[in-house]
Image: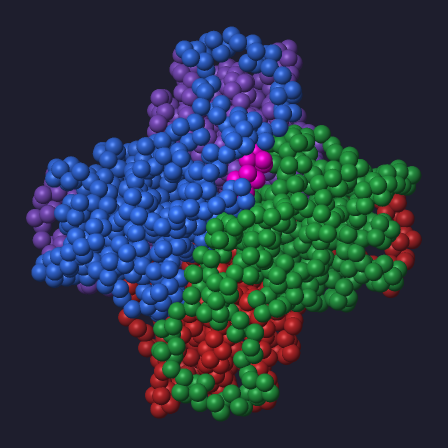
Chain colours: A green, B red, C purple, D blue
C-alpha cells in the first residue's frame, strides 16, 4: 500500500470549532496551560493548514455580557479574517453552560426566567448565524440534565425542551434564515445525566417536534463512546433516518471523562468504519454523508501553541489517511469477494418478494414447513475474514 | 417508618417470564446447575406466590421443531394450568436467537431464507398470542447485530427490520388481534453490537414505521445500565412519548455482562426512582405507567429450586417495598417543601406565557437585556437536600 | 426497624478535606458557582456539624507561591481555629496537579527539574504535617500518567515513583515524624490513564518499596467505581493485606467522570456492604477498619453555601444510618441462620486439616476419587435469600 | 511502508489454547454452531499454520470424570500428535469452572469438600503438566468470586486462595517440577465479581504468598479492558515487577461481556502499544517479554471450521504486522527526535543525582526556592506529535 497526498484542501470541507484550538487546557484539577487564542489568529492558522471553515459558540467570539458596540467590533474583526482567508462558517451554536446562571439547566431549568434568558440568548445568536451564512445551528444541552432523578420533573423537562426547539424553529422559518438545527447528544458530564444522552434518544425526541423536518442530529464520536455504544451504528441509523445534519469528529478511550482526543487517536478501527461509511455510504449504495467534517477535539493539556497546530493538522491528516484506506478496502476484489461470500449485499433484497404479500409468505412452505434450519445453520458466514482484510487495509499491509 | 403489607396479589399485576424461573443456569463458562422446570409447575408456583401473569417465548413452551400435535399438547396443558390458577398471559414473544440458524441474524440476517423463516416463526406464534389473549408482543432482536462494522450493510439492516415490523403489524391489524408490539433494546450480548441498542434508538426507529402507533418499547433495567445510561430518564422519555408499552424489571451492576439480578438487587437508588415514576408519575402530574410489572431476571446460578422461588418472591416484595417508600416520599410535607424550594414544579409552566409569541419574548427586556444573570446565579437549588430526603425514605429512616 | 440517633460526634471520627466543602464548583464546562471559603470558617462549620477532623493539600491552606511570612500567617490562623474547635488534622497531602508545571507529571514527569521540584514541595509540606500532628500523608498522583502509551517510558515512570516514595519515606523515618504514607489510586481523570489505577495496582507497587511497611493505600469509593470494580472487594483485600491506612468516602454512578457525590448517594447497596465491612469486619472475625472516616466529595454545583453544609451533614448522617442498619443485619438471627445455611462461616476453616500435609490430602480418597461431584452440585447455596435480607435491612423493612 | 513476511514460524513462539479453536460457540443465548474439534486435529492444524505450541485445561483433553485408562488414552493420542508436529505444551491449567460443583467457588468455595476436591483436581493435572513439559501453570479463578458482598467472608476467601497457592507451590517445589504459576485476573463473568479482578490485585495478592518468587501473572487483553483499564500500563507494571510469566492475547471492545476477539480486532492502538512493549521493551532499555505469545480468543459464533482456521491465522498475522510496524516506529529518526524533544528518555535518569542525599536536595535552592514554575510551565511536551507518528506508522503511512 502506498500512501497518497494527505494535504487537506477546502474541498475536503474540514471545519474546526474556535473552542478547540482555542482551549486553554483548564481541567477539573488544573489551571490553564496555554494563553487565550485570538479568534482572528485561529482563522488564519486554520486556513493555512487547509481547513474549509470555522464554527463557534457566541461566547467564543464575543465575551459574555459584551454590549452591542463591543459585540460588533468582535464580529467585524472576525468577518474580516474570514474574508481574507476564504474560510466559511457552516455551523454556529450557543454557550448555555459556562455561566453559573445555567447551573441547573438552561432551556430546561426549573426557573422560568432562566429558560427565557436562555431562549433569548439563542435567538440573539441565530441572527448572527444568519448574518454569517451558517447553515446549521447546533444545540448541545450541556446543562440540561440532573444528578437526582426524583428531584427533577423529567416529563416537564422534555416538554420545555420541545417548546424551546419548536419556538426557535418557528423563528428561523419566519425569518427565512434557511438554517437547520442539529441536536448534539451526550450521556453525562458536566451533569450527572444529560437529557437526550445518545443519538437514539435525540432522534426519538426530534420525531415529536413541530418542525421535525428541519431538526437533525450532530453526533460526536466521543460522546457515544462514553457509553461504550458503537458510533458507526449510531451514525448509520442517523443517516438512514435522513438526520445526520452535522458530525463532531474526535477520539475517546471508552467510558471515562470526555477526552476529545484527535480524530483517530482513540478507537482506530471504529474511526476506519466511520470514515468508510461517511465517504462510501452503505455496501449496497445507501448515500454517504455530504456535510462538513467537523473536528470537536481538545489539544492535549501537555501541548503548547505549536502542539495545538500539530494536533489540528493531525485530525485532517488522519481523516484523509483513513479515507484513502477505506477507498482501497472497498475497491479490493478480495474484499468484494469476501463480502459476497458473506452475503452482505443480499441484505438489500427485501424479505418479501416484489409484490409478495404476507399471505403468500404464509403459503410458501419452503419458507417454514420445509425449511431445513439445521442444514442452514452449519454454513459459515466468513465475517472474520472481512475483519482481517479490514485490519490489513487499515494498517497499509495490502 | 413502618413497613406495611408486602404480600403481592394479582392486583399488583406482577408477571414473570417462563424463562426466568425456568433458567437452568447454564452460562458461558458453566453447565446447568438446575433441572428443567415444567411450565405447568411454573404457573402454579407463580400463582401461589401472588403473581398476576406469565409470559414466554414460543420455544419456552413448545420445543423447537415440535410438530403440530405435540405443539397442541403443550398448549393445552399450559392453558389448563392458566385456567386452574387464574394466571393470564399479557405478553408473548419469539425466540429468534437460540438456534444456530439465527447466528448471523434473524429478521436482519444477510440470508433472505433465514429472514423469511424468522418472519414465519413470528407469524406462527402471533396466532398463539392471540389465542391466549396476549395484548403485547415483544421483539428482542438478540441476534440482530454485528461484530464487524464494515462487514454488514447497516442501512439495509434497518430497512429489513422495518420491513419485518411493518409486515407483521399489518398481519395483526388484518387479523384484528388487538395486539401491540414492544421493541426491547439492548446494546450488546450475545452480539458484539446489537441494532437498536438503547430506549432512544428503539423509539427513533419506531417513529419511521408504517404502524408506528401500535409499536412501543419494552425497556429492561439491566440492558440500559449495561451502557451506564440512566434508566429512569429513559423510561421518562418513553412515557413522555406515549411508548412505554411494557417493562422488564431486574438488577444490574453497571457495564458488564447481562446479570439479570433480582429487581432492586443492583442499583437500589435507581430502582427507587423508577418505582416512584412508574407508580406516581411526574412531579407535576404526568401519568404513571399502567401496564404489567414484568420481571425478566435470572435466579443466581448458585441457587437450587428453593432459591428460585425465594428469588421470584424477592422481586415482588422489593417492588412493593419501594412502592410504599415512594408513596411516603411524595406525601412527606418536608419533601414537598424541598421540591417547591428547588422549583421542581415550576418546570411544568411553559416558558412562553399563555398566548405569548416569540415576538413578545423578544420585546421583553426583563428576559434578556435587563436580566441579572450574576444575581440569579448565586441562588442555590437545594437538590442535595432532596437527595438526602430520598435516601432517608428509601432506608426507612423517615 | 426504628432509626436511632444519627447525630455525629467526634467519636465517630468523621473527617473532611478543606477542598470538599471549599470546592467552588468550577467544572470543565463551567465557571465557579460559589465564592471561596475561608478555611477557618470551614473548620468552625465542620466542628459545629460534629466532625472530628479536617484534612488538606498544602495549596488549600496556603496559596501556591506564598512566601514564608504569608505561609506562617495562614498556618497560625488555621491552627487557632483547630484549637478553638478541637478539630484535629489526621491526614495531609500535596497538591501536585493544579499548577501547569505539573502538566506532564510531577514525581514521574519526564523533566527531572519538575520531579525535583515536586519532591521538594512534598518535603516542605511533610514538615507542616508533622507540625500539625497528621498521622497519614496521602499521595494522589493526579498527573502521574499519560495519554499516549508509546510516548512515555512506562518502566522508568515506576522507577521514579518508587525512588520518590523511598526517598520521602526515608526522610520521615529520619525525622521521626511517625507519619505513614497512603497511596490513592485512580484510573483516569485528569490524565487519560493514571499510573497505579486501582487499589490492586497500588498495593502491588507498594510491595516493591524500601519502606513498604509504612506505606498503605487510601482508596476512594468513586475512583474504583469509575472502573466498575467492586469497591468492597478492593477494601477487603487492602484490609487483608494490612494496608488500609485511610479511606475516601463518596458516591459515584459508574464509569463516567469523577462525580464525588455525597456518600451513599451513588451505589447504596455497595455503600451498605462497605460500612458493614469497615464497622463489623469479616464474617468470621477479621478486623474492621480503625482509621478516620474521611469524606472526599464535592457538593453539587447547583448548591449554594447552605447546600454545602446540608451535603456535609448528609455524608455523616448516611454513614451513621448505614452503620445502624449493618449492625442490625449482623445481629438478626434470621441473617445468621441464612449465612450458616450458605456456609459463609466455613470459609474460615483451612482447606487442609490442622497439621495435614498435601501428601495426606493426596491420600484422602474421599476428597477426590470418591467425591461425588454430581451429588454436591445439586445443593443450593441460599445466596439470594441473604441478598434480600440485606435489602430489607437496608430499607428499614426489618 | 512496505510490509514484509507475515508468515509465522515456531520461532515466533505463538501458542493457542485447545479451547480457543475448539470453542463450539455456545453462548448465554444460543446453542453451539460448530461440532466438537478433536484435539489431535487442532494440534495438526495449528502446526500447519506455523504455531509453536498448544495449551489446555485438563477437561479440554480428558472429559471430566474419565477413568484412568480413558485418561491415558487421551494423553497418548495427544502426545503422539505433539511428537508428529513438533508442537510443545508450554502452559497448562485446570478447569475449575464448568462443572456445577464449582458454582459457589472452587479454591475459595464455602464448602471445604469442594475446596479439597478442587485442590486435588489441580494436583492431578500438575503431574500431567510436568509429564508434558509445561513450564507455566495458569490459575484463572473463574468461579472464585461473589454476587453479594455481605454473603461472603471476603478476608477468609483470600486466606483460602493463599492457602491453596502456597500448598500447590510447595508440591511443585517438592516434586522438582520446575513449573511456575501464573495467576490470571478478570473482573467479572461468569461471577458478578471475581476475586483478584485486575493485574494489580493479582500482583498484590502474589506479594503475600509463601512462594511469591515462583508466582507471576497471566494478564489477558480483554479482561483488563472489560474494566476499561489501560492494558499496556498493566503489562508495564507486571514486567517492571518481574512478574509477566505469561500473556493472553485477544481483542475486546471495552466494558461489556468477554468478547475474546482476534488479537488486534478490538483496540488496535492499544495492541500496537502492547506489541511495541513486548517486543522492544522500555524506551530506555527495560527488558522486553520473552515468553510465549499465547492467543486466548474465540472464533466468532458466525464462523464454521474454515472460519476457525482463518481466525487462528489472523491472530498471528496481525501480531507480526504490528511487530513490524513497531520496529519501524522505534527505528524512525523522526520518532527518535520527537521522543527526545518530549524528554521521554530523561525519565530513566534518577531524580536524585548519583549519590545525592535528600539533604542535598533540600539544600539545592535551584530545585525549589529558585525554581521558576511559571517559566517551566509554558514549555510544550510534544506528545501529540508522537501520537500522530505512531498512528502513521501503524497505518503504514510512513
**Magenta region: which residues?**
D383-392
Q: Is residue D351 above or below residue A393?
A: above
Q: Is residue C32 above or below residue D84?
A: above
Q: Residue at x 49, y 32 (%)?
A: C152
Q: Residue at x 49, y 53 (%)?
A: A398
Quadrant of the rendered image containing residue B32: bottom left
Main SS of residues in magenta = helix
Residue C3 seen anywhere in this rendered image of the structure: no
Residue A91 spot, x, y in % from top left: 76, 51
Q: Is residue C126 above or below residue A85?
A: above
Residue C148 seen anywhere in this rendered image of the structure: yes
Q: Is residue C327 above or below residue A157?
A: above
Total residue callouts? 0
Residue D68 spot, x, y in % from top left: 9, 58
Q: Is residue D391 magenta?
A: yes
Residue D364 spot, x, y in % from top left: 53, 9
Q: Residue at x 61, y 61 (%)?
A: A280
Q: Is residue A292 magenta?
A: no
Quadrant of the rendered image containing residue A310: top right
In the image, is A176 to the left or to the right of B86? right
Viewer-proximal residue among B126 and B110: B110
Residue D152 spot, x, y in % from top left: 32, 49
Q: Residue at x 55, y 83 (%)?
A: A352
Amino acid at each position: 500500500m502506498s500512501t497518497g497526498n494527505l494535504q487537506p484542501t477546502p474541498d475536503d470541507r474540514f471545519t474546526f470549532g474556535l473552542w478547540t484550538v482555542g482551549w486553554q487546557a483548564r481541567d477539573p484539577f488544573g489551571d490553564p496551560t496555554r494563553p487565550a487564542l485570538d479568534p482572528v489568529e485561529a482563522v488564519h492558522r486554520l486556513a493555512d493548514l487547509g481547513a474549509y471553515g470555522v464554527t463557534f459558540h457566541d461566547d467564543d467570539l464575543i465575551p459574555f455580557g459584551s454590549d452591542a458596540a463591543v459585540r460588533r467590533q468582535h464580529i467585524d474583526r472576525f468577518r474580516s479574517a474570514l474574508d481574507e482567508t476564504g474560510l466559511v462558517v457552516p455551523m454556529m451554536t450557543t454557550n448555555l453552560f459556562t455561566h453559573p446562571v445555567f447551573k441547573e439547566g438552561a432551556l430546561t431549568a426549573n426557573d422560568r426566567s432562566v429558560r427565557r434568558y436562555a431562549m433569548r440568548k439563542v435567538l440573539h445568536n441565530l441572527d448572527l448565524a444568519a448574518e454569517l451564512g451558517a447553515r446549521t445551528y447546533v444545540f448541545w444541552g450541556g446543562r440540561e440534565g440532573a444528578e437526582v432523578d426524583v428531584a427533577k420533573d423529567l416529563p416537564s423537562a422534555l416538554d420545555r425542551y420541545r417548546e424551546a426547539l419548536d419556538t426557535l424553529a418557528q423563528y428561523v422559518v419566519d425569518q427565512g434564515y434557511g438554517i437547520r438545527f442539529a441536536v448534539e447528544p451526550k450521556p453525562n458530564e458536566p451533569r450527572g445525566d444529560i437529557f437526550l444522552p445518545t443519538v437514539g434518544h435525540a432522534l426519538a425526541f426530534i420525531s415529536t417536534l413541530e418542525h421535525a423536518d428541519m431538526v437533525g442530529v450532530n453526533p460526536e464520536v466521543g460522546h457515544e463512546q462514553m457509553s461504550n455504544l458503537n458510533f458507526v451504528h449510531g451514525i448509520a441509523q442517523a443517516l438512514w433516518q435522513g438526520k445526520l445534519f452535522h458530525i463532531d469528529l474526535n477520539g475517546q478511550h471508552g467510558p471515562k471523562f470526555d477526552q476529545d482526543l484527535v480524530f483517530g487517536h482513540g478507537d482506530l478501527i471504529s474511526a476506519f468504519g466511520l470514515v468508510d461509511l461517511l465517504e462510501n455510504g452503505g455496501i449496497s449504495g445507501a448515500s454517504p454523508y455530504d456535510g462538513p467534517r467537523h473536528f470537536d477535539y481538545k489539544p492535549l493539556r501537555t501541548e503548547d501553541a505549536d502542539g495545538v497546530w500539530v494536533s489540528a493538522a493531525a485530525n485532517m491528516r488522519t481523516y484523509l489517511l483513513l479515507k484513502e484506506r477505506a477507498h482501497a478496502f472497498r475497491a479490493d476484489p478480495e474484499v468484494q469477494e469476501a463480502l459476497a461470500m458473506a452475503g452482505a449485499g443480499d441484505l438489500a433484497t427485501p424479505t418479501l418478494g416484489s409484490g409478495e404479500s404476507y399471505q403468500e409468505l404464509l403459503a410458501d412452505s419452503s419458507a417454514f414447513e420445509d425449511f431445513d434450519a439445521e442444514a442452514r445453520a452449519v454454513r459459515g458466514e466468513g465475517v472474520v475474514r472481512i475483519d482481517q482484510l479490514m485490519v490489513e487495509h487499515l494498517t497499509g499491509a495490502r
